[in-house]
Image: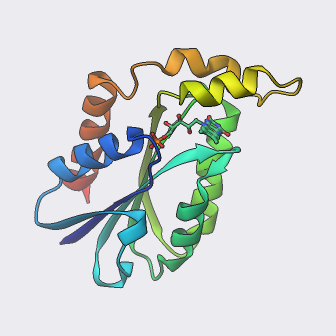
């Protein structure tokens, strides 16, 4: 099986998840940032990681997902500032899944990702704030060791079962 790990990151959180996925998958494997992502056509299993921006996968990932075609096995992972089980995050992941309509979704994983303090400061000065920003302080230190272990366990179970 040929596997491809792709990640989009601004501040490094999603890259940490990508490296954990890459570490745990066996066989022939490649890892790329989204800027250098190859055509997914030559791979059997794809793990695509994004950060949530304005309630959706970040724009680079939104551009890439439609390239994944023909029943490819696909796993999404994501980091965000909103709480882990919020509708806000569920909707962002659903957005990604809906865009990948012709892929076979093998699973998803999401966890908190520390939010750029400059961004929090700028937002807190605005009268209208993003719905998720009140949760941003809880994201400090994430993804942490536990998050990475949880992700690795999920990836192992998928690979074992498939
Ligand atoms: C401009 C901007 C917009 C963001 N929008 C959201 C959002 O809509 N929902 C959310 O939960 N987190 C949002 N975040 C938080 C990021 O998704 C989170 O910090 C993520 O872990 C960043 O990942 P990275 O380090 O891989 O770039 C936003 C952060 C920035 C800087």
Residue shown at 59%/64% (left/top)?
62
Q: Is residue 81 above or below residue 13?
A: above
Residue shown at 51%/71% (left/top)?
64
Ligand 1: quadrant of the figure: top right
Figure disc tally: 0
Which residue is outermost to the left? 27
User: In front: 24, or 39?
Assistant: 39
Q: Is residue 50 above or below residue 82?
A: below
Q: Is residue 97 above or below residue 36?
A: above
Q: Quadrant of residue 86?
A: top right
Q: Position of residue 84 (x, y in %)?
A: 54, 28
Residue shown at 65%/56% (left/top)?
95
**Quadrant housing the N terminus:** bottom left
In the shown orientation, is residue 51 left or right of residue 149? right
Q: Quadrant of residue 26?
A: bottom left
Q: Position of residue 14 (x, y in %)?
A: 40, 44
State the colouring used for the structure image.
rainbow
In the shown orientation, is residue 74 left or right of residue 90? left
Which residue is outermost to the right? 127
Q: Quadrant of residue 5?
A: bottom left
**Quadrant housing the C terminus:** bottom left
User: In front: 159, or 84?
Assistant: 84
Q: Position of residue 44 (x, y in %)?
A: 28, 74
User: In front: 120, or 58?
Assistant: 120
Q: Position of residue 154 (x, y in %)?
A: 30, 41
Q: Is residue 1 above or below residue 148?
A: below
Residue shown at 38%/82% (left/top)?
39
């Amino acid at each position: 099986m040929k596997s491809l790990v792709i990640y989009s990151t601004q501040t490094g959180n999603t890259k940490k998840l990508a490296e954990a996925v890459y570490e745990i998958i066996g066989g022939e494997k490649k890892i790329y940032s989204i800027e250098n992502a190859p055509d997914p056509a030559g791979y059997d299993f794809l793990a695509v990681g994004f950060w949530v921006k304005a309630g959706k996968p970040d724009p680079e990932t939104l551009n890439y997902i439609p390239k994944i075609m023909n029943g490819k096995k696909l796993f999404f992972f994501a980091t965000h500032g909103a709480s882990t089980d919020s509708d806000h995050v569920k909707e962002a992941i659903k957005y990604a899944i809906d865009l990948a309509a012709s892929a076979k979704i093998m699973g998803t994983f999401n966890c908190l990702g520390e939010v750029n303090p400059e961004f929090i400061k700028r937002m807190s000065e605005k009268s209208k704030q993003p719905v998720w920003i009140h949760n941003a302080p809880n994201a400090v230190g994430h993804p942490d060791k536990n998050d990475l272990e949880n992700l690795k366990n999920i990836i192992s179970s998928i690979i074992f079962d498939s």
